[in-house]
Amino acid sequence: MAEVAHVRGGLDTEDMTTMFIETENTPNPATLKFLPGRPVTGDTRTVDFGEASAAEGRSELAETLFALPDVKRVFLGSDFVSITKAPDVSWGDMKPVVLSTLTTFFESGRDVLAGDDEALKYDIAPEDADVVVRIRDLLDTRVRPAVAGDGGDIAFRGYKDGVVYLTMQGACSGCPSSRATLKHGVENMLRHYVPEVQSVEQVED
């Protein structure tokens, strides 16, 4: 169930606004999904930062969040931010600080991403181009929308010799059921609709 936080912002008493940030639980109890009610990446791109050093020079928002104590992972979706915390702290303690940080950042009008931070590109053999188109279409239309609802994403990383390589991102990255979802859900679907697919393997960024 989503919760809505009313965060008051503004520069002075004559210019006070209220920003509404929804929070949603994810299948991963260490990860919480924050919906600021405005674009984050603003398109189909998703960016997953597994550690603070990965965000340096790429996302000021992610860098700001990693500066908070006990933030271990930051995932940026089209219209949401998923944050994974350290296991020994509670969301009750962390949530107000994260909400305040998100509000301050979005009200500043700063860019979330530095430049055109695209996902990694992988060379595809020319003879596999049609297969890859079908794989990516299925991922984009049937898999990614459902996974985004849980605060994560599945990124296509490559295809070779019948094997599809995918990366679990955001809440899905550390979710105990992610491997089962990948092997039994995604793999079975791809093999059904794309006969050339033999298996799906998870790779890390």
Image (tube, rainbow, N blue to C red):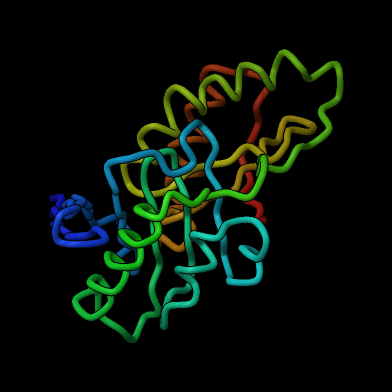
State the residue at coordinates (61%, 40%). 200
- Of 5 and 92, nearer the camera is 5
State the residue at coordinates (21%, 51%). 19
Residue 27 position, x and y percent, is: 30, 56
Residue 169 position, x and y percent, is: 51, 52
Q: Is residue 132 above or below residue 35?
A: above
Q: Is residue 202 above or below residue 186?
A: below
Q: Is residue 165 above or below residue 173?
A: above
- Of 199 and 84, nearer the camera is 84
Count of marks, rendered view: 0
State the residue at coordinates (34%, 62%). 104
Residue 37 position, x and y percent, is: 27, 42
Q: Is residue 77 left or right of residue 37?
A: right
State the residue at coordinates (42%, 25%). 142
Q: Is residue 124 above or below residue 71?
A: above
Residue extending furthest toward the top? 130
Residue 146 position, x and y percent, is: 35, 35
Q: Is residue 111 left or right of residue 163?
A: left
Image quadrant containing the C terminus: bottom right
Residue extending furthest toward the bottom? 88
- Of 47 and 165, nearer the camera is 47
Q: Is residue 2 left or right of residue 154?
A: left
- Of 11 and 43, nearer the camera is 11
